[in-house]
Each structure stands twice: as C-alpha cells, then as structure tokens.
Image (cartoon, rainbow, N blue to C red):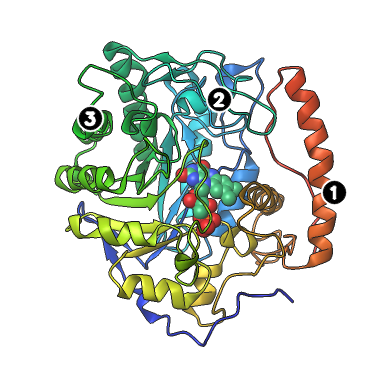
Amino acid sequence: MVRRFPTAAPESSILGEHLKFPSGKIAQNRFLKAALTEMLSIFDPSTPGANGVPTQEIINVYDKWGNGQFGVILTGNVQVSPVHLEAPGNAMIFKEGETPARREAYKKWANVTKQDGALAVVQLSHGGRQTPITVNKTPFSASDVQLDKEVRFIGFGKPVPLTPEQIKTEVIERFVYAAKYAYETGFDGVQLHGAHGYLLAQFTSPTTNKRTDHYGGSVSNRQRIVLEIFDAIRKEIPASTGFLIGLKTNSVEFQSEGTTVDDAIEMCRAYENIGFDFVELSGGTYEQLAFQHLKESTKRREAFFLEFAEKIRPVFKNTVVYLTGGFRTVNAMVEAIKSGATQGIGLGRPITAEPDLPKKILQKLAPSAVFDAIDQSEFVLSLLASNTQIEQMGRNSLKEANNDVTYGLSDFSDEDTVKRFGKAVEEFAELLKIQASRGVAIPNVITFEGVKA
Ligand SMILES: Cc1cc2nc3c(=O)[nH]c(=O)nc-3n(C[C@H](O)[C@H](O)[C@H](O)COP(=O)(O)O)c2cc1C
C-alpha cells in the first residue's frame, strides 16, 4: 500500500476544466505531463545515423501515460542536433537521420500518447554547452563560457560561439525540421526547451550570453533566437493548422548574473505578443539546480516557482500558462489555480510513481501524490529513481501489464525498497566512474527490480 502526502479532503473539479490554446486546440483538463528524459532511444556511437530512434520501450511507457488522463503529454527532451545531447539515449529528430523506421517510431509514439484524449507534444531541445564532453568536446553555445562542473563524473567542453549563419543553419533550421517532423508524424505540437540552461537558455541568460551582436545584450536581443524559431516554424505550419507551439522557460535562475524575474516578465510579454500557445514556467540551470524549496515560505504552497509565476502571470492574456515543479497535493494545485498564479499544473516525478495520477485525482481516488521515502530535495537521487520507474514502465505494454499502469513499478514510499535502491545507485556510480574515465558515454538509467514485479 503506497504512502501519500498527507492532505485534507480536496475539491478537485477545477482541475478537470478544459484549457483552450490560441491556435484552437483544447486540452481536456489542466494537467500537463512534464518532459522527463527517457534515455530509452537507440544510442550507439558506431552508427550515428540510427541514434535517437525511439524504441518499443518508449512506446510502452507512453502506452501507460496515454491512459493516465492528462490534458497535454510532453515527450522527454527530443534533440534536434545529433551531436548536442542532454544525455546519451535521448530521442532525436535530425535531417541526416531520416529513415522510414524513425518516422514509423514517431507515428507510433504519437498514437499511443493520444489514446485517452491527451494532446501529444514533442519537447524539442538542443543541449548546447550542457552536452556531455563524452558526446561532444566542442559544443555550440551563445558564447564561449564553459560549464565548469561535472555531472555524474562527466565534464563539459569549451563551447564554440555560433556565428549568425550557424544560428540559422544549426539551430533555427534544425528546430523547424523537427517541428515539421512532429507535425507530419501526428503530434499535436512542439514545446521549445528554453529552460534549465540548455542552448536556448544559454542565449536568454546573461551568464552564458556575452555576445555583442543582435543576439546579445538587451533582453530583446537575448530572446531573439526563440522568437525567430517561433516565426520560422509558423511559416511552415501556420496557426490555422491548430499545431501548438509552446515554450518551457525559466521564471528565475537564482544566479547573481542570471535571468531575473524582471527579465522573465519582459520576455514573457514578447512570447504572449508573438502568439505562443503555452508557456511552462520552471527555473534553474546545471550550475544552480532549483527543484527544491529555497525559502521556508514556499513549502506550504508546494510549487517551487509559485511566487515568480504570480509576478509573471499578468502579462499573459491568450497564451496558456503552466507551472511545473513541486506540486504534490490536490489542495496546493487547486489553490495555485484559484490564486491566478497558473492555469495548468505540470507534474514530473509524481507521475513516474503513478502514471495515472491525473485520472485518480479527477475520479477522487487520490488526494495527493505518492510520498517517497527519498527526500525530493535530493534532486539527483529522485531523478535517478524516476528514470528507473520510467524504464520499468517500458518493459511491457499496458495490455501485457493487465491494464495496470503501475505494474512492476518500484514503490519508493517503501523504506526497504529505497535502501535497496541506494545500493543499486552506489553500484551504478562505480560503473559510471569507470566509463567516464574511458571517455565513454552511457545512458544514466539504473535497471532495478520493483517490489511488485
Ligand atoms: C527523470 C527526470 C527527467 C527530466 N527530464 C526533463 C526533460 O527532458 N526536459 C525538461 O524540460 N525537464 C526535465 N525534467 C524536469 C521536469 O520536467 C520538472 O520540471 C521537474 O522534475 C520538477 O517537477 P516535479 O517536482 O513535479 O518533479 C526532468 C526531471 C526528472 C525527474
């Protein structure tokens, strides 16, 4: 029996309300499945053209979320450049890798995701300077500011600033190619990943953008690349098609020279004016992770970025706003909507423990998420746990799992399971260290047996 976050009996009906996007599509409720990197696509450095093809495991994973009654389901970050990854094992869409097998896999992915009426949206991303050095020693970025950090024993190369011509060919055209691909394979839209320090955030943030041309300096120059990608996609796929274009963006970066909430307000005004269908507010970068409560006062309201969302929200009139990060109880979700801070609720870690959490909430079967015995403020550990659950979801289709979306998933509200997982993490860390010392990139997914398996 899973343990849940303690909460009073909530009234959840507001969460079941529709959300209408400016280009016409309607989400069946306010829930957004946040992007969660799966690292379950083909990755073999010796066959680069085949890399990033989604596997049957991914189809199985979305067979579960596609029956969880979400309004919108985002894929994990799908890379638009084969040599700029968030992680080995990411799904990719890139012109050099065009094959019938890749197209077929994306069609299947869109189909399973939409099974119970959710809108299926591909998150498109470019790792920029946050590409592991094992994947690319000289990644592109806005400027040559190197990320001076190791993530799971692997560092990052000194980035090469993109020339204006490369911004066109290596960034804008790649995002447009991937958006068209998503449209043609049956997805309802794309979300540009402009948060968490990846390439688009490297342009919008003054910590990483030191350019002196018209892509650097003022807020409007720093966000130019995002607006140019939007325009270029809309030229190919007009709003009249209903195809959604959304953005994940930082509300704040918590770094002395980073994007401030005032910058975010100014940028969001431009996103509203140009016609983004939705904006998902998040925060932080690899240098300053922000998926935890940095202030005691935000704990009760759960969402990490709520007070920033409250400041930004008034600029949005047509663009739909989602807030992601920290939501665990129905009461806090309802309160965030009623207070006007957000229209939609993004969920990440809670829905790897329970892929059908929205359905349970809307049917009043669950008042809150599973209360993990892993401290959620230990983001890296809880991220590894979530990726393990995603891998477990991928082992069978919903039918093979006897229509139980939680079949075979580890229950991390159970202390013993968490202890066993801790050992598996230690062993995995040893493997990562060895691979890192050899300069080999491997997907960061721990294979672990769940208690119900
Ligand atoms: C396993 C895992 C993978 C993630 N992958 C992505 C990703 O691909 N793209 C992205 O924008 N955010 C990613 N995130 C961040 C989540 O979308 C979300 O913003 C964050 O987990 C906070 O929400 P939560 O508190 O509901 O988990 C990831 C988070 C986790 C735990």
From the image, tell me which residue sits under label 3. Answer: 224
Disc 2 secondary structure class: loop
**Residue reaching furthest to the front:** 256
Query: Residue 376 falls in which quadrant of the image?
Result: bottom right
Task: Residue 432: give x, y in percent of width and height.
Answer: 76, 31
Q: Give left or right: position of 104 versus 245.
A: right
Going from the N terminus, do you reach mark 3 or mark 2 first? 2
Q: Is mark 2 within 8 Å of ligand 1?
A: no
Query: Residue 18 falls in which quadrant of the image?
Result: bottom left
Task: Locate the C terminus by quadrant.
Answer: bottom right
From the image, tell me which residue sits under label 1. Answer: 423
Task: Residue 57: give x, y in percent of width and height.
Answer: 65, 44
- Can residue 28 be seen here? The reply is yes
Disc 3 secondary structure class: helix
**Looking at the image, residue 7 lies above or below residue 28:** below
From the image, tell me which residue sits under label 2. Answer: 148
Q: Give left or right: position of 435 versus 138.
A: right
Task: Residue 204: give x, y in percent of width and height.
Answer: 32, 33
**Looking at the image, residue 139 lies above or below residue 446:** above
Going from the N terminus, do you reach mark 2 or mark 1 first? 2
Which mark lies nearer to you, 3 or 2? Answer: 2
User: Residue at the spot x=65%, y=69% of the render?
Assistant: 371
Task: Tell me which amino acid carries mark 1.
Answer: Lys
How far apart, in angstroms, are the residues tagged by discs 3 and 2?
A: 26 Å
**Looking at the image, residue 439 lies above or below residue 363:** above
Disc 1 secondary structure class: helix
Task: Tell me which amino acid carries mark 3.
Answer: Arg
